[in-house]
Image (cartoon, rainbow, N blue to C red):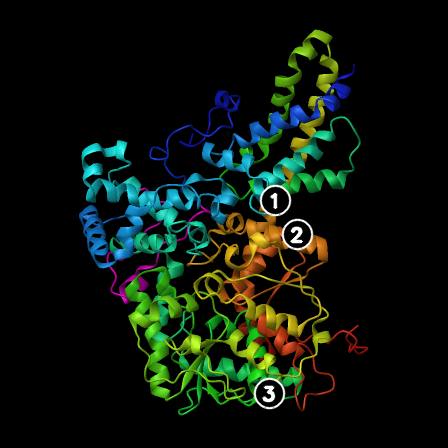
Amino acid sequence: MPEDQMKPEELFQIDYKPPGKGWMETKPDIRRGKINWAAVPKSVEYLDLPNPRKWSPLDKDWKLPDNWKEIILEGMRERIHKFRTFQVFMDICVRCGACADKCHFFIGSGDPKNMPVLRAELLRAVYRKEFTLAGKLMGKMAGARDLTEDVLKEWFFYFFQCTECRRCSVFCPYGIDTAEITMMGRELLSLVGLEIDWVTTPIANCFRTGNHLGIQPHGFQDSIDFAVDDFKDLTGIKVEAPVNKKGAEILFIVPSADYFADPHYYGLLGYMALFHEIGLDYTYSSYASEGGNFGLFHSNQAMKRLNSKIYMEAERLGVKWIIGGECGHMWRVINQYMDTMNGPADFLEVPKSPITGTVFENTKATKMVHICEFTADLIKNDKLKLDKSRNDQWRVTFHDSCNPARAMGIIEEPRYVINSCCNHFFEMPENCIKEQTFCCGGGAGLGTDENMEMRMRGGLPRANAVKYVHDKYGVNVLTCMCAIDKAVLPALMDYWVPGVQVGAVHELVGNALVMKGEKEDRTDMRGEPFIGKETAKDV
Amino acid sequence: MSLKNLLEQNQDVIIERWLDLILATYPSDGSFFLKKQKNQFANPVGYTISKEIEILYQTLFKDVDTETISTSLDSIIKIRSVQDFSPSKAIGFIFLLKKAINDELGNTVKEEGLYSELHEIESSIDTLILKAFDSYMKSKDLLFRIRADELNRRTKIILSRYSDTD
């Protein structure tokens, strides 16, 4: 009989209560559905990262190097000295509990180690033991804990159950950035070869080809050409979408999913409509063919290297400034880390809209403007002809993507754009949107399918708020402006709120935009006729 | 007084007891939150469980249509089937209703000799268990289908181009 199978007499003793042990004594239940697969050795080797090997979190032996403990503690020591914030975050928490019930994974699971305070405590307890006098002398009484292999496994389990969304940080009276604690945790794990594939392989691909999927420059060009053709089929208009055009005024950076995944692609078609209609002088880059930066989910070094290509391409192509598309964590990297990692971008000009003359003073340091800021400015200055009724098929709500909302504070612009493009917009309840927005449950490299159970429970608070507006107002589309959202929210909706689709903000723009020269029977970005414009063959 | 009447009269206290027993299947720090936080958006798990078990409880003494029962069961089981529970524990929360009734009305049943009625009520609870098993499998099936759909969506645009050129 297998070890984990109960004997018949045990089956009759029904006890539903979990063991009442303290958190330090409770080992995680590592099993399928809750974990991400380990990084394949090929990607680990490609990035020159330590300890490439085949292993699985389900194995008993994780094939750690013999001196793993020494490596981790040395890594901690180095980071405590290098990053002042890390030490402050280790020392300053008073365990007030303000963050405890704010994490979507905790709300969806009830697992106390998903309370941000306790997840951080996994690191803090070891920090106390190794780096503080009280912890060294008083041990467990001072909240200190030895670093053992089980503790390391627990780190791996829980630091890959944090999407670095920073909702908890909004409520922390000390402003502790819990995402940075997770980032430190993941950096330390990487030192001994504890990597997940959905983070490490995209980084390796991005190093090689400029995007997470590993699409090569000619593949990128083909994708854009296909989109141009598709756009012509939908609208009758042939747009220009230059790639690697030297001397263009603006470099346009999008997440790679925009040019191959559903529903991202409809947003890409929306960008094309917009740029064509205003006659923007812009270019894509086949080398900076990715806005997303999975380096953020791995280590500061990887983040820096991935971010640098955007600015290197801006310099090589000789553009004046940059527009960034509907990406999530790209904006955290740009707004919070770029300047000190790869800046200053003083070879670029302070962005100024060639259409309205608006100077985007807020982007002085980064020289990069969010597409929603850019479009909102166009609408505000009455530069676009928009027909809201062209989105009448949609009853719309908006999911604030964590990083744009909390890391760059872009809250009103997307709402202004959406409200200018549709007649039926409904907000979700106040404690689920804007700065308090709930994560999609798949950010920070967790948006893969092997941990689907984890994603569904982590995404429950978001889905629950969508269900509310779906039931109350008949909402049938959840718009957002982040590629990870667009990838993982459809699954979340299918599970919790069937009948709600996911769309891009610029998909609505593309639909509503009245374009010069468009054909009589043009459709929306999904190829569907507008309401009232159906022909006999459509119905 | 019939047991059905007793169940109806003692509805609040039995549901409260059942809720406590269900929430005790979560780790203690978690169950405290699930019980305490009443906002439906800040605590969808606790809110859903407490709302839906009321409907399930009422099936014991009054007619509730099958669709309503299924919706209530699905709402709870969809949650528990993606949480840290084995299949038996995910649906086993319904057995706890027997315990809740026994805790609150056990003595009365004994004193009044209501065993045959209790037997009927327990059979109704067993039926709920069977429905819960269906609901659990439905959730798991849905999850597997969603995994497959997600893979399709990731490559849909690329694949559609190849199919166009055929």
At label 3, the amino acid type is Glu
Please report the residue visible at 50 percent of the width from the left and 23 percent of the height from the top.
A8
At label 2, the amino acid type is Tyr
Which sits in the foreground, A309 or A263?
Answer: A309
Q: Where is residue B109 in the image (x, y as percent from the top left)?
A: 69, 12
Secondary element at tag 2: helix
Q: Against A235, is A461 above or below?
A: above
Crowdedness near tag 1: few (<14), some (14–19) or many (≥20) residues, C-alpha within 10 Å: some
Which sits in the foreground, A449 or A372?
Answer: A372
Report which residue position mark 3 lands on.
A277
Which chain contains the residue that carries disc 2?
A
Please report the residue visible at 60 percent of the width from the left and 48 percent of the height from the top.
B141
Secondary element at tag 1: loop
Secondary element at tag 3: helix
Q: Against A392, is B65 above or below?
A: above
Tell me if I can see residue A262 in this picture.
no
Circles 1 and 3, Cβ within 8 Å, touching? The answer is no
Which chain contains the residue that carries disc 3?
A
Q: Distance between the residues labelled 2 and 3?
A: 37 Å
What's the magenta bit mostly, secondary-structure-wise? Answer: loop
Q: Which of marks 1 and 3 is in front?
A: 1
Please report the residue visible at 58 percent of the width from the left and 85 percent of the height from the top.
A229
Disc assigned to residue A468:
2
Q: Position of residue A182 (x, y in %)?
A: 35, 53
